[in-house]
Amino acid sequence: MGFMAGKKALIVGVASERSIATGIAVAFAREGCDIAFTYQNEKLLSRVTKLAERLHQNTDLLFPCDVASDDEIDAVFAALGKKWDGLDIIVHSVGYAPREQLAGGFVESITREGYRISHDISAYSLAALAKAGLPMMEGRNAAMLAMTYYAAEKAVPSYNVMGLAKASLEACVRFLAADLGPKGIRVNAISAGAIKTLAAAGIGGFRKMLSYARKAAPLQRTVTTEEVGNTAAFLCSDLASGITGEITFVDAGANIMAMTLDDT
């Protein structure tokens, strides 16, 4: 029996087999968690269905959800409430900015609309999920988990407005943790190192980011979605019952370095 047996989780953000959310789902399922999924659009439904089937999860627990729509978020929890009597975990693995925002210089690329979209989808949606999911989670020693990146703290070339959105997301984690703690709900985030995912492919110069991560990290490599998934399973389980409001790095140690080892 896994250490998440009896837990019920909603995972938001599966886009492909290489998604960080997929790595999290694999770890959750291995540890005995029951999982419901959302999918952004009909194009992604077949991918999410295949994942649910592979992990022996109930394919009746797949719900359409564009996190930019409060109505769609509310509909997810209304439908989920008819299937489950409560919810223990929400995983927010969502991040988006228009492609042109992630190429070139920061001042050159940023626009008011790009800023609005990236913050709405990448950061506000965590609060929106918390607001809508609260009635199902309250009093259950529940947990929420978001995915962030080191660009919330340091300037990363071409990451541009998404760095601002991730900083907003991390602040949202802390405010949610403070607000929901008395209700028995923990809120944390994982800051994953550079991983070759579908979303990362849209970032200008991402191959250079991967190369730099390998050189900078004390472990001299990048990390995998499986490693992020294992950390997520821990943080969302009762094993991490005393942890909330934290940003946990899973990046082979890259964030601790002031310069690459080649520069010393």
Image: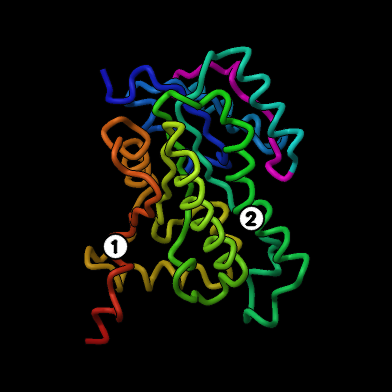
Badge 2 marks a residue whose secondary structure is loop
Looking at the picture, which amino acid does disc 2 mark? Answer: Tyr
Q: Is residue 56 shown above or below 39?
A: above
Residue 149 at x, y = what percent?
Answer: 46, 60
Quadrant (top left, top right, bottom left, bottom right) of the C terminus: bottom left
Residue 57 position in % (x across, y down): 48, 19
Question: 165 or 19: nearer the eye?
Answer: 165
- The image quadrant where one finds the N terminus is top left
Of the image marks 1 and 2, the number of the one nearer the N terminus:
2
Looking at the rendering, the stretch of residues picked out in magenta corresponds to 55-68
Question: Residue 59: within the magenta?
Answer: yes
Mark 2 lies on residue: 96
Q: Residue at x 50, y 51 (%)?
A: 175
Residue 239 is one of the magenta-drawn residues: no
Q: Quadrant of residue 69?
A: top right
The type of residue carrying mark 1 is Arg
| Residue 76 locus on image (x, y percent) | 66, 27
Identify the residue at horizontal 33%, vertical 31% (top origin).
Answer: 237
Q: On the image, numbered disc 1 is attached to which residue?
A: 221
